[in-house]
Image: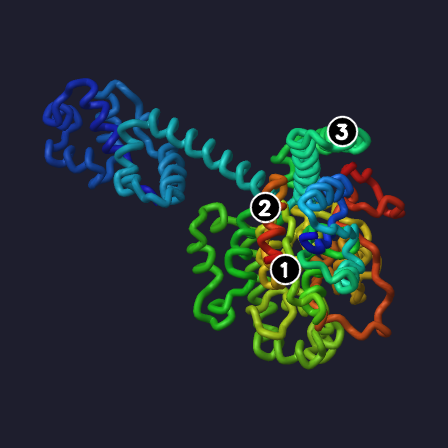
Amino acid sequence: MAGKVLLIEDEPHIVEAISFLLERAGWQVFTHSNGQDAAEVAGRIAPDVIILDNMLPNKSGIDVLREIRADATTSGKPVLMLTAKGQARDKAAAEEAGVSMFMTKPFSNQAIIDTVKMLAQ
Amino acid sequence: MARSLVGTRIRERRRNRRMTQTALAAAAGISPSYLNLIEHNRRGIAGRTLQAIAAELDTDVAALSDDADFVLINRLTEAAKMDHSNSAEIERIEEFVGRYPGWARLLLQVSELSQQQREKLRALTDRMTHDPFLSETMHQILSNITAIRSTAGILDSMSDIPPALQQKFLANLRSESQRLSATAEAMVDFFDTPTEEAATSAANTPEAQEFWSARGYYLPKLEAGETTIENLLENTGSQAATNSQVLRQSLERYERIANTLPVDVFIQSAKDTNFDALKLSQTLKVPVGSILYRLAHLPPEPGFPLFGLLECDMSGAVLFRKEIPEFALPQYSSACPLWPIYRAFGRPYQALQSVLEMPTGGRLLTYAYAESAGPDRYDLPGLLRSTMVFTSDPQAFPATRSIQPPILAGVHCSVCPRKACAARRIDYILA
């Protein structure tokens, strides 16, 4: 087992595709679909890598990231943020909030596997 | 004001007729050297001498007159000044217009057409950049494409997927394709709305908007008396901005409010009152409308919340807008009707304090206030302007117990997922 990944994303078909890819690569994948209690879920699962979509229902990805960084149990976890092109302002805010890396949608399957592996090292 | 071009026209006509200066001067009863001065526009000409020359050149006095060319020269000069390369020989414009009036008119036509196209392009670019509908739709499209690409990649590259899972992924592909198609159609419908209509529907002209945005909504030199409104307008780098009455009026209002509320005093008072608009109004004895305006026109200050601002008239048309990074405003009207900026029209001269909860979960503290927008008249109902400032900075939020529950609002119905909202007037277009 490579480790634990928490995928916070509200698009179910993206969740299914990424989960399938990462599980085949040996990761144990946990999923969550809204921003409201995402940080709390991250604290409970203690994943090795968190994949966080920027636009989530109830709370933005950046707000979730701030909460993750503010919690001692998750503050050091690598966070890969999924963004769309043209969200330059969001990127700047996410960098300020302590994001580890961005990945711009749409991305290749191999890119997300490689990035998660790199972040976990 | 351009100088007279009568002499230039006389010279052109004389040359076209292959006539010497000496011959024409003799016919007009003047010396060749004096005619030379006239032809180079260094001496005026009128009366009998002009009539004699016109007759000798087989034309009439009106054809040699300046009236039409003055307008042409002034407009061409204006167009040349808008060219930042400064490549046009403006000092020779009179000669150009006098010698080649047909080419000059054509050049002016091309220049004005180019200016119109620039304005349209700017309006379209602005719309693409700021429209919340487009932003949400692009996100939706990219999400659809991401799901399709990932799923197709799995099906294409992995041959050992169990049949049931293969069927599941194929169904996902079909579903995402349909959603992508629906979203793309909605986007096409959106672009069917003419840009010109959108661009002219708001009073916040692109010139005024650009001016304020480029300067961070704060003009320290004007506040310190180190420059004037005239100077600011002359140095905008854009003729359209220099001539904009909307921009001039907004500068006059800024100067008026800045004089009433000096920046240092205001910032300190705002901190002392925890950025509460009503308390600020009472402390500084200034109307709430001015307080709201000033809150959004300050230098960046550590420990001071960043306030955005939106103003509209009674038709809902946007008059002024200042965004903050956390909250994209619609460029034109038709925002969420639950915003307090509209409710304030029903309660003029009453400060409204509200918290908006957006569909993403983010919260905004807002103050809204509607007040008179112009002098009262016997023959017209009072015109109101509504102002709303907003911030997402938690330090500006009052204690929970002193404020009403948040209003569940959005930006625009078409991108708002609150499907059961009583204020909904347009379907949520994202599948």
What separation in Å lies between label 3 and label 2 (alpha carbons)?
30 Å
Give the residue at mark 2.
A86
Tell me: residue B391, above or below residue B304.
Answer: above
Tell me: residue B352, above or below residue B151.
Answer: below
Subunit under mark 2: A
Q: Quick one: quadrant of the C terminus of chain B?
A: top right
Question: Mark 3, mark 2: which one is toward the viewer?
Answer: 3
Residue at (86% x, 64% y) in the render? B405
B37 vs A18, nearest the viewer: A18
Residue B52, picture quadrant: top left
Residue B138, picture quadrant: top right
Q: Are marks 1 and 2 on the same chain?
A: yes
Subunit under mark 3: B
SS assignment at label 3: helix
Give the residue at mark 3.
B170
- State the image coordinates of residue B366 (x, y, percent, origin top left): 75, 63
Residue at (78% x, 32% y) in the render? B162
